[in-house]
Amino acid sequence: MNVLGLIFPILSGIFFLIGFGIVSLINDKKRINVLAISLAFIVMIGIIFMDLLPEITEVSYRISSTKIVKILIIIGSILLGVGILKLFDIFIPNHNHHHHEKERNHKEHIGHQFHLGFVISCSLILHNILEGISIYILTLENFTGGFLLAMAVGLHNLPLSIEIGSSLEDVKNKKMVYGLKSSLILSSFIGALILVLFKIEISDMILLVLLSISLGMIIYIALFELLKEIYNYKTQKETLYGIIIGIILLIIMAFID
């Protein structure tokens, strides 16, 4: 067992804790939420093009199946990821939200915010479990590489945790909120711990499926959740600030990677 292989995933999860702390310290929840939405959108796009797509491409090259079979597996798994979150749309009530200068219904607003935070959390838990596995494996091979990957994952987590924290701030079911936050903080560590405790060797085919499902979830959130929010808040300066900060973070993460 590599101790640092378990510590580094914890380090990436601490960024979630920092983000949640930032939200709790800021009084103007409305402005930080608008900024966090656009920031999270840019980071999600970065995850798609800088993280998941290259990883899926690399893993697919290691699989000996025909190209058409691999393409069908990837597309099918992406659609499965989209479908999972679409089910949340159907079964989680009170998430449709109409934006006006004054909220028509405060309860509707809280329900919408919970829905947004919940679906992002679910996709990130799966994504970070996979990242935790990657961090552990890379640390076994290269100490510096494992540390840099953990920092890159953490930088992904920070703005997303601000979005999730601001979305869940007014939710009354605090046990569920704490459960989601704890799962996010520990998700990378759980991924690494699964490998250590169960000595699981994940085949390239299974990894390809899991990565593609994660990609489908991230695409759904970016295009069908966050992009709509950005459009609704397009006239607010915080939206522009979030986009600019997100681009800067992506540039930083590109250098770290």
Image: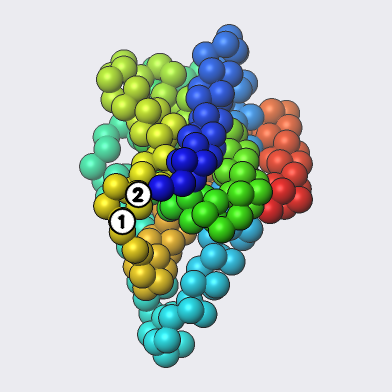
Residue 182 is drawn in which quadrant? top left
Q: Nearer the viewer, residue 187 or 248?
A: 187
The structure residue drawn at horizontal position 31% and vertical position 31%, both measured from the top left corner, is 94
The structure residue drawn at horizontal position 46% and vertical position 59%, both measured from the top left corner, is 215
Residue 50 at what x, y percent from top left?
63, 58
The residue that label 2 is drawn on is 196
Q: Does residue 134 appear anywhere in the picture?
A: no
The residue that label 1 is drawn on is 199
Q: Disc 2, disc 1: CB below 8 Å?
A: yes
Residue 131 in the figure: left or right of residue 202: right
Vertical arrangement, residue 252 with respect to residue 35, above or below: below
The structure residue drawn at horizontal position 58% and vertical position 38%, both measured from the top left corner, is 154
Instruction: Give neighbour class at mark 1: few <14, some 14-19, many 20+ (Cα, 10 Å).
Output: few
Total count of labels: 2
Say what amino acid the circle numbered 2 marks.
Answer: Val
Residue 212 at what x, y percent from top left?
43, 64
Q: Nearer the viewer, residue 61 or 158?
A: 61
How far apart in space, not on screen, are marks 2 and 1 (Cα)? 5 Å
The structure residue drawn at horizontal position 72% and vertical position 52%, both measured from the top left corner, is 254
Say what amino acid the circle numbered 1 marks.
Answer: Lys
Q: Which mark is residue 63?
A: none
Vertical arrangement, residue 206 with respect to residue 171, above or below: below
Residue 35 at what x, y percent from top left?
63, 29
Q: Nearer the viewer, residue 147 or 240?
A: 147
Q: Mark 2: which secondary structure?
A: helix
Instruction: Give neighbour class at mark 2: few <14, some 14-19, many 20+ (Cα, 10 Å).
Output: some
